[in-house]
Structures are given as C-alpha cells and as structure tokens.
Image (cartoon, helix red, strand yellow):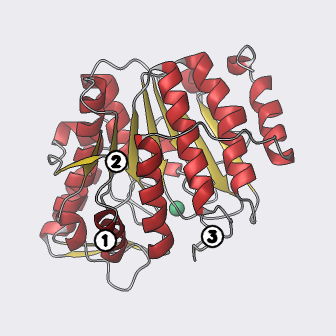
Amino acid sequence: MGLYFHHPASLLHDTGPHPENAGRIRAIEAVLEDAGWPGLERAEPPRAEREWLTRVHGAALVDAIEELCAAGGGAIDFDTVVVEASWEASLRAAGAAAEGARLLLEGAHGFVFCGLRPPGHHAESNRAMGFCLFNNAAVGAAHALAACGAERVLILDWDVHHGNGTAEIFDRRADVLYVSIHQSPLYPGTGAAGDFGSGPGDGMTLNLPVPPGAGGEEFRGMIEHVVAPAARSWRPDLLIISAGYDAHAGDPLANCVVEDHDYAAMTAAMRELGSEIGAPILVCLEGGYDPAALARSVLITVEELVGGPPPPSVSAVPVVADAVARVSAHERWRSAF
Ligand SMILES: [Zn+2]
C-alpha cells in the first residue's frame, strides 16, 4: 500500500489566472477518485515545523513569506503570487514531504505521494520563485538526513524545468545526489551539463539536459543509463522524485513529448531500482499544466508504484549516450558505469 498526502489548503492557495492553480489538484483528485484511489491510503500531512524549513531556507525568507501572507498576500516575483491561505498551503506541502520521508524510513508504507501545491523545486535557500514558495523535496531530503536516520538521499527531478532551487540548496552537500532531467533551453536557464556541484558536493549534482522535442526515449534513457547505475553505486537510503508532469506532450509550458506510457515506464524503472537497492520512494508533485494530462499521469505514477512488470529496456539515444560519457568521466562516478 502507498500513502497519498493531500490537504484542502492546497485548493485555497489562489493564484488567480495562472497555470499553477487549484484546478490542477482538483483534476488529479477527480481522476484518482474515479479510479478508486488504487492501492492508496489517504491522509492529511502535518504543517512543516519552522525547524524543518530552516534546514534548507534562510529564516528571513520564511519570515518574509509568512508576513506577506499574513498581510493578505501579493506578488513575490512576476509569476509567483500568494494570498493569505498560501501560508497554510505551503506549510502542508513542505510538511508532507518531511512526514512522508519519516514514514518511509520507518518502513510504514511502500511509497508516499505528496499531491499538494504550491510546488517547490524552484525555491532556493533565500528566494521563492517560479510558482514555488518552499522547496518541498529539499525539506523532505533534509528531514530524512537530519531527523530520520538516512545517510544518503537521491532526488530525481523529472520536471521539464531545471530545479534550480534544489540544486542551489544542495550544491555543496555530499549526502544528497541531485539528478535533474530538464529541457534546455528553458526557464530558469540553470542546469548546465557541466555543473556537477561544488566543494564537498562535487559530482553530487547530475544535470541531464535534453533538447526541445525530447520524449520518452530521452527521459527513460536517462533513468536507465544514468540514474540507475549511479544509484546502484551510491546506495541512497531514500529516493525522492520531484515529479513534474510538464514534459508531457500535452503541456502548454514546454516543448517535450513525454507520453502517458513513458511516465509509466519511468515510474516502473524507479520502483524496480528502489526495490533493488532497498530504498523507498517519496514523490513530490512539482509542475504539470495540462490538467487532464497531469491527472492521468499522476494516476499512472501511483498505479506503477503499487506494482507491475519491469519496464522494457530502452537503448541510449545520442543525448543519453553523451550524458553517460560525461558523468562516467567524472572522478566521483568512474567506477559506477
Ligand atoms: Zn516545471
């Protein structure tokens, strides 16, 4: 059985006419309801405690968001807005990731899916941006490491945008492997293939950019040929998926062509990997702006996490082969491939 976290506060984070809106959650929950919430127990997550947030965010950012919400809301940047209820929504979204990590590391569930908003992966340590307030996946990873006994956490970010926030937060950390598959060029412009992290974190950031028009072969290939070998070598205790669904062919904000069945195969590959290395899977919802495609893809993700046959192997297309060559040439990963 899996656990699905959701909370009504996600519906009250009112962004107005905006692609990242409450309709996304309504669409997902309607599709899951129709499917009978397959293999899922549902629960409401706790609010993130301040200490959970300040492991990855500056206290000034936490205070600023709280104050802006308490004052009735406003714009943080061109495309990131809050209302009063956004505070509660952001605490529940971050709290779900942290609590999900805790439950998984206690062995309480097979997987946890955090179906909340706002999303998180663009939120940096000291800056909210790109529809994101707090970095939910980062809060979950930091909680796993600081409070739940994990020693190594792998975050796979398959949202079509680079997770600049997660990358920045863990840039120098040796205990978080951040892997991002993202379209390039695209917002926010970070995530260059040659950026491997800094200092003690050198080699612990793997950027896997793909060109506009990339689809299942590229996304699935990156998981099979880069993420899986790296994880088998490094043996993380927890796998976190920053699961955006905006690489979907139907998505209006990007130009990739991932299909429903590709998300099934990507999820199945991560399920098999987690099972092989003994690491449970925490999924944090990120982007995905075609509500119908998003909702179907979330259902598919949940169904595949519950179980299924191993995914068929895919050959390494050139952009994947290039990534394998680049990563395996890094000193950190020479023996992993
Ligand atoms: Zn995105």
Q: Earlier in the sequence, mark 3 or mark 2?
A: 2
* Disc 2 element: strand
Which tag is nearer the camera, tag 1 or tag 2? Answer: 1
Tell me the tag on residue 30: 1
Label 3 sits on what residue type? Answer: Ala
Residue sitting at 25 percent across and 57 percent down?
90
Tell me the tag on residue 288: none
Label 2 sits on what residue type? Answer: Phe
Task: Point out residue 192 in the picture as x, y percentages from the top left corner.
Answer: 70, 47
Task: Point out residue 193 in the picture as x, y percentages from the top left corner.
Answer: 73, 43
Tell me the tag on residue 113: 2
Q: Quadrant of residue 15?
A: bottom left
Quadrant of the image containing the C terminus: top right
Q: Earlier in the sequence, mark 1 or mark 2?
A: 1
Question: Looking at the image, can residue 54 be seen?
Answer: no
Tell me the tag on residue 254: 3
Crowd rating for badge 1 (residues with CA inside 10 Å; few <14, some 14–19, many 20+): few
Quadrant of the image containing the N terminus: top left
Crowd rating for badge 2 (residues with CA inside 10 Å; few <14, some 14–19, many 20+): many
The extreme bottom residue here reads 17
The extreme top residue here reads 335
